[in-house]
Amino acid sequence: NAGVTQTPKFQVLKTGQSMTLQCAQDMNHEYMSWYRQDPGMGLRLIHYSVGAGITDQGEVPNGYNVSRSTTEDFPLRLLSAAPSQTSVYFCASKTKQGASYEQYFGPGTRLTVT
Amino acid sequence: DQQVKQNSPSLSVQEGRISILNCDYTNSMFDYFLWYKKYPAEGPTFLISISSIKDKNEDGRFTVFLNKSAKHLSLHIVPSQPGDSAVYFCAAGTFQKLVFGTGTRLLVSP
């Protein structure tokens, strides 16, 4: 049971390049989400999904696309990277267990855009 | 407009004493509240949670208190240990959307 996995761990992009951050979970959680963490800003929600085929925007969605074709995977795409997207990205998943919304995070991807 | 605020960027306590971390929120529709612990270069780790129908939840050395009228929650760690030194984030929201505070760095000295 690996929990939530993310690849790559580190990535450097040039402005205008595209890439996909991968996220997978093996806990059969219906809910998955992407956050970014910037200094002094806490974690901010980018996009989330409540199940395969269903996605929605979070607090800071501009510049990012997502899709959810399977329960396990929730990739985050940057179509044209900008320096403002330099950040640490965390993927998370959770399920409802009674009244518990315990959410598990992946180890993060550190992205630098030059 | 920050919906979840952690006004203390840092806190230092001695080993064995109580650590109290505070968090304030503004949205009365929030029905679930969580605390996370984060070490450098790792993802946040879930610590403890509380729903809006409760005012206290305990798990070992960790207790979370919720004061809905004041829109305030706190995390108590008793006794504090050096391994508790980390950044602590509170989060509040609904199942679909959580809003995180900016974090409090806790340092527990021997």
Image: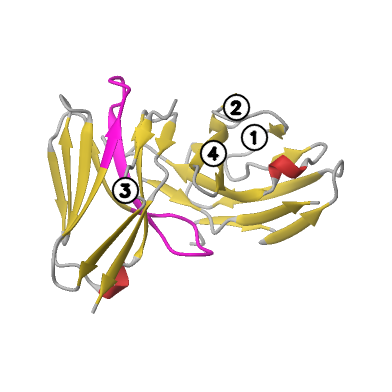
Pinpoint residue B52: horizontal percent, then vertical percent: 21, 29
Q: Amino acid at mark 2?
A: Thr
Letter of the chain that mark 3 sits on in the rendering: B
Q: Amino acid at mark 4?
A: Ser
What is the secondary structure assignment of the residue under circle 3? Answer: loop
In the picture as drawn, the residue positioned furthest to the top comes out as: B29
Pinpoint residue A9: horizontal percent, then vertical percent: 66, 61
- Find disc 3 in the rendering and name its residue: B8
- Find disc 1 in the rendering and name its residue: A68
Within 10 Å of disc 1 (Cα), the crowding (few <14, some 14-19, many 20+) is some
Letter of the chain that mark 4 sits on in the rendering: A
Q: Amino acid at mark 1?
A: Arg
The structure residue drawn at horizontal position 81% and vertical position 36%, both measured from the top left corner, is A79
Q: CA distance from mark 4 to mark 3?
A: 27 Å
Residue A32 visible in the shown view: no
The structure residue drawn at horizontal position 50% and vertical position 42%, both measured from the top left corner, is A41
Q: Please give the label number shown on residue B11.
A: none
Look at discs 2 and 1 and give the one toward the viewer: 2
Q: Nearer the viewer, residue A46 or B87?
A: B87
Q: CA distance from mark 4 to mark 1?
A: 10 Å
Within 10 Å of disc 2 (Cα), the crowding (few <14, some 14-19, many 20+) is some
